[in-house]
Image (tube, rainbow, N blue to C red):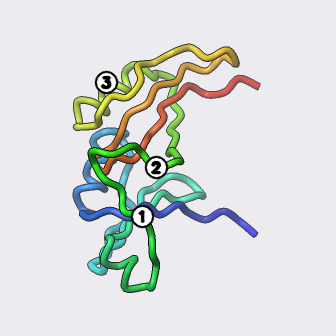
Amino acid sequence: MKFGYTILYVTDVEATVSFYEKAFGLKRQFIHESGYGEMITGETKLAFASVELARSNGVSFQQILPAGPSPAFEIAFITNDVAAAFQRAVEAGAVPVAEPKQKPWGQLVCYVRDINSFLVEICSPLAP
């Protein structure tokens, strides 16, 4: 078994992919007209599927509410410049949740919510 990708269900795939390009510097792999898009994120992909596509596949889920709390998971991006990445994300439209903070295990960590209200962690590499 191999972990292939994480798919987030969103109302607007194109807007979400564009946001992730601007906010986090990712590049799109592709967007398909069916309502599915992938980012270039290494071996494990980050993908977005439209709510309509998910429902057409018989998938049932709790749709996220922008004014409500984030779901009980996060996406994490690793960078050597957490403060700059946090600022870039906020300038691109992310909602700041927690400013960069040094953790006891050595990482610098902060949080934002994306345009769909998904929680995104931005952190420094974990030292061995």
Q: Earlier in the sequence, mark 1 or mark 3?
A: 1
The residue positioned 22% from the left and 56% from the top of the image is 15
**Do the CB atoms of the residues marked 1 and 2 lie less than 8 Å apart?**
yes
Where residue 102 sits, quadrant-wise, is top right
Residue at the disc numbered 2: 71
Q: Amino acid at mark 2?
A: Pro
Please give the label number shown on residue 87.
Answer: 3
Q: Is residue 36 above or below residue 23?
A: below
The residue nearer to you, when weighing 3 against 111, is: 111
Residue at the disc numbered 1: 62
The residue positioned 52% from the left and 60% from the top of the image is 6
Mark 1–mark 2 distance (CA, rounded to whole Å): 9 Å
The residue nearer to you, when weighing 96 against 91, is: 96
Where residue 29 sits, quadrant-wise, is bottom left
Viewer-nearest of labels 1 and 3? 1
Q: Earlier in the sequence, mark 1 or mark 2?
A: 1
**Do the CB atoms of the residues marked 1 and 3 lie less than 8 Å apart?**
no
Location of the N terminus (image quadrant): bottom right
Mark 3–mark 2 distance (CA, rounded to whole Å): 23 Å
Q: Is residue 50 above or below residue 80?
A: below
